[in-house]
Image (cartoon, helix red, strand yellow):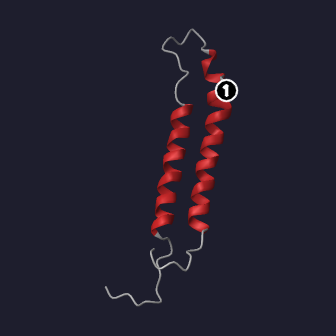
Amino acid sequence: MNMSDNTKMPITGKGLRMLLMGLVVMVAGFVLMMGGGTVDPDRFNWAMFDFRRLVAAPIVIICGIAIEIVAIMRRPGNTENE
């Protein structure tokens, strides 16, 4: 495959690293959201309504989505390294 000098990849190496970082942040948010269930169906576990699952995890997931958007929309600079 022959690529000319004026053809650039739409997402550079830094953009790919940002995409992976955003994916890791989103997975961390989903891991924070896990748990709070109960084995016994007759007992209710209030742990599923704690701060970590209702506030912190969705904020972490939204931050991961924001990182993904920035990584996709970011324009590559005029650096010759990338």
Going by the image, does 5 lie left or right of 65?
left
- On the image, which quarter does residue 29 sit in? top right
- Locate the N terminus by quadrant: bottom left
Q: Total number of numbered labels? A: 1
Residue 51 image position (x, y, % from top left): 67, 26
Specify whether 49 is left or right of 68.
right
Q: Specify whether 16 is left or right of 62.
A: left
Q: Pointer 1: what residue?
A: 51
Seen in the picture, residue 52 relative to 63 is either above or below; the reply is above
The C terminus appears in which quarter of the rendering? bottom left
From what the image shows, is residue 78 above or below residue 72?
below
Q: Label 1 is placed on what type of residue?
A: Phe
Q: In which quarter of the image is residue 26?
A: top right
In the image, residue 35 sits, relative to residue 73, either above or below, namely: above
> Observer-nearest residue: 1 or 13?
13
Query: Residue at horizontal 51%, vertical 35%?
Result: 31
Pick the front one: 47 or 7:
7
Residue at the image position 51 percent from the left and 75 percent from the top? 10
Nearer to us in this view, 33 or 67 = 67
The one of 49 and 17 positioned closer to us in this rendering: 17
Q: What percent of the width, then of the height, locates residue 6?
A: 47, 89
Q: What element carries label 1?
A: helix
**Residue 18 rendering spot, x and y as whole percentages:** 51, 58
- In the depicted structure, whether residue 72 falls above or below residue 7: above
Residue 58: x percent and y percent? 64, 39
Neighbor class of circle 1 (other Cα within 10 Å; few <14, some 14-19, many 20+) is few
Residue ID at (59%, 55%)? 67
Looking at the image, the residue that sits furthest to the left is 1
